[in-house]
Amino acid sequence: MKLEQMRGIVAFVLNQKTGALMAARAFDTYESKEEGQEIVKFIEILQDGRIVCLAVKVRNFSNSLQEIEKDFNNILY
């Protein structure tokens, strides 16, 4: 899928040594609340040390912000 077609939260995974793009995946949090949990699963399977960048590309992001915040807190704390 091209970046222009992605919406929701887009995760980019970079190699910590080279900065090379390792993966890019969109999580459509507007369409499905379960996508917040999918972001957590995606991050949990990454090799330690990888750089993860998250970008938001959606109009009504606030609809799912609280749900996603809870999911992230589970892996961060």
Image (spheres, rainbow, N blue to C red):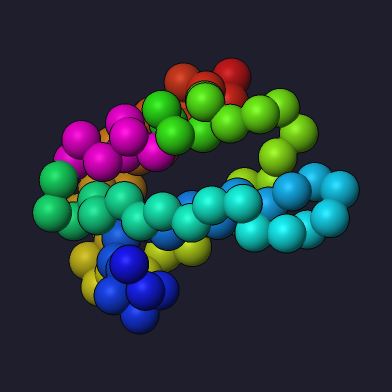
Quadrant in which the N terminus appears: bottom left
Residue at point 54%, 52% (across, down): 23
Residue at point 32%, 34% (across, down): 38
Q: Name the image quarter holding residue 6.
A: bottom left
Q: Name the image quarter holding residue 42.
A: top left
Q: Name the image quarter holding residue 69.
A: top left
Q: Residue furthest bottom?
A: 4
Quadrant in which the C terminus appears: top right
- Tell me if residue 60 comes above or below residue 9 in the rendering: below
Residue at point 41%, 64% (across, down): 56
x, y percentage for residue 15?
Answer: 74, 48
Is residue 76 in view from this perspective?
yes
Is residue 66 in view from this perspective?
no
- Tell me if residue 38 comes above or below residue 51 in the rendering: above
Q: Nearer the viewer, residue 36 or 48?
A: 48
Q: Nearer the viewer, residue 73 or 43?
A: 43
Q: Is residue 16 left or right of residue 77?
A: right
x, y percentage for residue 12?
Answer: 55, 56
Q: Is residue 58 magenta?
A: no
x, y percentage for residue 73?
Answer: 49, 27
- Tell me if residue 29 comes above or below residue 72 in the rendering: below
Q: Residue furthest left?
A: 31
Count the numbered circles shown.
0
The secondary structure that most of the magenta stretch takes on is helix
Residue at point 52%, 26% (across, down): 45
Q: Is residue 60 left or right of residue 24?
A: left
Q: Read off the magenta span.
A: 33-39
